[in-house]
Amino acid sequence: MKHLLFLLVTLLLAMNLSGCGYNQIQQNEEAVIAAWADVEATYQRRADLIPNLVSTVKAYAAHERETLQAVTEARAQVGQIKIGAEQLSDPQALAGFQKAQTQMSGALSRLLVVAERYPDLKANQNFIDLQHQLEGTENRINVARQRYNQSVQVFNSSIRTFPNNLTNNFLLHLERKTPFQAETGASQAPKVNF
């Protein structure tokens, strides 16, 4: 008789398993796992994105720096070569002066080409873009963390409230999930050095 009663109770429990929260607890746990994967994916995006952006900014800033340095050096050479009225008949002095002017023209031409072809592409704009990308990435990370914490809250509530807590205690034995917690010193923003 006891076996029959136990079998009947077990059968009734099995038929009402969906009403005891078993499936809901499983879905909630999967939501937590997926939300954490989103957090990790967002961190990976930052790990992939930021070094590439920093390299791009460095490369373009180096190009601008090289162009401006070429103009500065050419200008310095032009300033060093002075031709007075008495040297106008010296072919070597004129050749040196002309060479310096040609270098200056070439450097200025490169600078003008950069400005004409890419009027918006200045190092400061790249830095502004990098700043926006950093801000956007940090916002994505924050949103992913919040979604994870919401999923954890739903899951933890589902295994602690009646009747789901009975299902968890007797069938699943799942532990509470830990919400995202900031690291010590996380209140300080990371620094990007060039």
Image (cartoon, grey):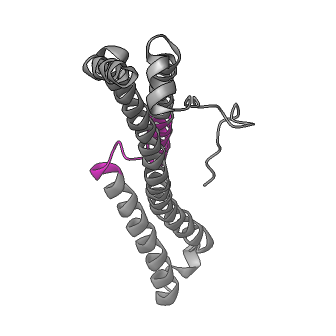
Q: Quadrant of the N terminus?
A: top left
Q: Quadrant of the C terminus?
A: bottom right
Give, as a single range, the part of the protein colored magenta. 115-137
Q: Residue at x 56, y 74 (%)?
A: 83
What is the residue that sits farthest to the front in this orientation?
1
On the image, the x and y values in percent for residue 152 come to 50, 25
Front position in the image: 145 or 65 = 145
* Residue 146 in view of the camera: no
On the image, the x and y values in percent for residue 86 come to 58, 79
Determine whether, in the image, residue 47 is placed left or right of residue 25: right
Q: Is residue 79 magenta?
A: no
- Number of numbered callouts drawn: 0
Q: Is residue 116 magenta?
A: yes
Q: Main secondary structure of the magenta part?
A: helix
Front position in the image: 89 or 1 = 1
Q: Residue at x 35, y 62 (%)?
A: 109
What is the residue that sits farthest to the top in this orientation?
162
State which quadrant residue 111 falls in.
Answer: bottom left
What is the residue that sits farthest to the right in this orientation?
184
On the image, the x and y values in percent for residue 75 come to 54, 65
Question: Looking at the picture, does residue 2 appear above or below residue 190?
Answer: above
Front position in the image: 1 or 57 = 1
Q: Residue at x 40, y 66 (%)?
A: 105
On the image, the x and y values in percent for residue 192 come to 61, 48
* Residue 68 in view of the camera: yes
